[in-house]
């Protein structure tokens, strides 16, 4: 069973998909259905949809997330978006350090660490992503890689803010591949993340930390992950692009958390 004091969190990472009309229709379709109590649901559209979806989600239980940001508040950083701007758009969460940002846009642990601290300082909740490549897993380096990413990403997090974080464990080889990790593999890394966090920030902060699994999650396999007490939800790409497949995931976790 899931640990009772932490609320499950499911986040939809739409990546570079959806236009405004399609995103708004998705939200309408979702809101027409009963959303599960006990599960926090976050939609992370591209930046151009944030303001409009922020207005559409106002007064609903759905939360808004962004997919990236820069760590400075304002200035000569052409093409970048700041924590202040995200806050202005009504954003609650921001995905940081996603493996696609790391691999395709050369984001390193130092940069990700600055972003995580800047988001927290603004009151935005980071969904901070870590995870190994297939080569690293096959080389037996999974925990060492995750440890390095955690050290860099959390280096500037002040102790008093540490209870507010979400960390997504996303093995790179499982993302978009249709080949999810096993529940047991995900549990092992989630437990490692929790231990690292406890050692760094103390027991109380660790009790508030929520760890997600990400990588080829769908309605049919989500409970394999959220059934473990170390895993509090998921970060979902492909299966979050249609309201129907996204809703299957919400329902599956909703039933799990409300089961006696
Ligand atoms: P996926 O993506 O669900 O399509 O594997 C997950 C992610 O990249 O966050």
Image: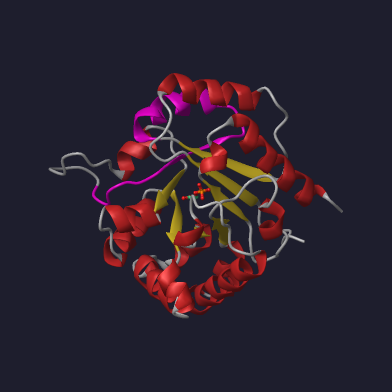
In the picture provided, is 258 more to the left or to the right than 145? Answer: right
Question: x, y percentage for residue 77?
Answer: 16, 44
Q: Quadrant of the C terminus?
A: bottom right
Question: x, y percentage for residue 192?
Answer: 55, 75
Figure coloring: secondary structure
Q: Is residue 58 magenta?
A: yes
In this view of the protein, which residue sits in the foreground, 29 or 113?
A: 29
In the picture provided, is 155 more to the left or to the right than 216? Answer: left
Q: Which residues are magenta?
A: 46-72
**Does residue 97 appear in the picture of this structure?**
no
Q: Quadrant of residue 205?
A: bottom right
**Does residue 43 appear in the picture of this structure?**
yes
Is 57 situated above or below 152? above
Outermost residue on the right side: it is 260
Question: x, y percentage for residue 124?
Answer: 43, 47
Q: Quadrant of residue 249?
A: top right
In this view of the protein, which residue sits in the foreground, 180 or 235?
A: 180
Is 169 situated above or below 138? above
Q: Quadrant of residue 112?
A: bottom left
In the picture provided, is 224 more to the left or to the right than 108? Answer: right
Please count the marks in the image. 0
Residue drawn at 63 percent across, 36 percent down: 245
Residue drawn at 32 percent across, 46 percent down: 69
Q: Quadrant of the N terminus?
A: bottom right
Question: x, y percentage for residue 84?
Answer: 31, 41
In this view of the protein, which residue sits in the foreground, 100 or 165?
A: 100
Q: Is residue 178 magenta?
A: no
Residue drawn at 49 percent across, 49 percent down: 176
């Amino acid at each position: 069973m899931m640990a009772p004091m932490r609320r499950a969190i499911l986040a939809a990472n739409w990546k570079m998909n959806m236009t405004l009309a399609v995103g708004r229709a998705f939200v309408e379709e979702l809101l027409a259905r009963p959303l599960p109590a006990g599960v926090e649901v976050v939609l992370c559209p591209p930046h151009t949809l944030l303001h409009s979806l922020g207005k559409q989600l106002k007064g609903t239980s759905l939360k808004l997330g962004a997919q990236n940001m820069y760590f400075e508040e304002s200035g000569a950083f052409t093409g970048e978006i700041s924590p202040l701007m995200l806050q202005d758009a009504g954003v609650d969460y921001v995905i940081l350090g996603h493996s696609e940002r790391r691999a395709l846009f050369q984001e390193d642990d130092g940069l990700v660490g600055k972003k995580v601290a800047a988001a927290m300082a603004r009151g935005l909740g980071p969904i901070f992503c870590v995870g190994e490549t297939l080569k690293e897993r096959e080389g037996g380096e999974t925990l060492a890689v995750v440890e390095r990413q955690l050290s860099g990403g959390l280096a500037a997090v002040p102790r008093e803010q540490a209870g507010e974080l979400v960390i997504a464990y996303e093995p790179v080889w499982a993302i978009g591949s249709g080949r999810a990790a096993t529940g047991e593999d995900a549990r092992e890394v989630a437990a490692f993340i929790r231990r690292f966090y406890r050692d760094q920030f103390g027991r109380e902060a660790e009790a508030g930390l929520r760890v997600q699994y990400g990588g080829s999650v769908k309605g049919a396999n989500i409970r394999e992950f959220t059934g473990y007490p170390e895993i509090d939800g998921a970060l979902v790409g492909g299966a979050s692009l249609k309201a129907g497949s996204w809703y299957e995931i919400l329902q599956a976790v909703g039933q799990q958390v409300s089961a006696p």
